[in-house]
Image: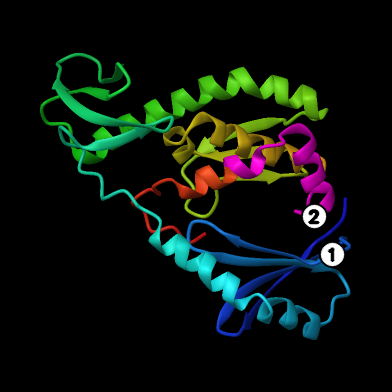
Amino acid sequence: MPKSNYELANIGNIKVEVHRGDIKNIHLSVLPPNGRVRLSVPAKTTEQAIRLAIINKLGWIKKQQADFVKQPRQSVREMVNGECHYLWGQKCRLSIKETSGKHAVNVRGDKKLELLVGETTTTDNKLKLLNSFYRDEMQQAISKIRPDWESKLGVKSDALGIKKMKTKWGSCNIQAKRIWLNLELAKKPIECMEFILVHELVHLLERHHNERFRFIMDKYMPNWRERRNLLNSLPLAYEDWSY
């Protein structure tokens, strides 16, 4: 498996993550949600070539970062009646109902999320209940699409988990064949979650975001760029992401 060396650089007042690896060409990315700059380069690329690659794209980088700053974000969650939440890309209103029985979340049509909670349930516990609901929704969706994608790609992940992440939509430990998906994906259209799942599965075939990686993505999910752009245009969680 090819190795990648990672270093930080400050070029033209832009912080850049430079990844050296077994690739042929330089590839520049500005990543959501806050415009982190990543430059993937061949292992023997000179410092001068790295600086030129960034300086020549400074205008484009700053525009991309400005677009991320303008991207809409959700307000702090208060977990009260009428508050706006999302489920699979649909905007839903929260409805709080008191119960003396088991706490639960119900979907009412495609416009309402109903929380059944006790009278003294705290905001934090309401949020934990909603996040548990989101996790269940994602697990059900993943169980339907994961086997087909692993079969198409000819790979097998040994473990796939869901957790809240502030730095990325997904991650893949290639050695352990373990994939994590961000819980926030339950709020996005399901095709966005599918894109991230496939993205991470493809890393089991190719570690780097290089030409081979993009070739595999193009072959098996030709519209992956449209899915990525859709995901990056949607409202972000209220947390202060530091992607």
* Circle 2 residue: 210
Residue 122 at x, y percent in the picture: 18, 37
Residue drawn at x 45%, y 40% as measured from the top left: 184
Counting from the top left corner in percent of width and height, residue 106 is at 29, 18
What amino acid type is highlighted by mark number 1? Asn
Q: Quadrant of residue 107?
A: top left
| Residues in magenta, as a range | 206-227
The tag on residue 25 is 1
The mark that comes first in sequence, 2 or 1, is 1
User: Height in image: 155 above or below 25?
Assistant: above
- Residue lying farthest top? 101
Q: Is residue 214 magenta?
A: yes
222 up-or-down from 209: above or below: above
Judged left or right of residue 157, residue 95 is left
**Residues marked 2 and 1 touching at CB (< 8 Å):** yes
Tell me the quarter of the picture where residue 3 sits.
bottom right
Residue 67: percent from the left, percent from the top? 46, 62
Mark 2 crowdedness (10 Å alpha carbons): few <14, some 14-19, many ≥20: some
Q: In whole angstroms, how far apart are the C-alphas of marks 2 and 1?
A: 8 Å
- Secondary element at image label 2: loop
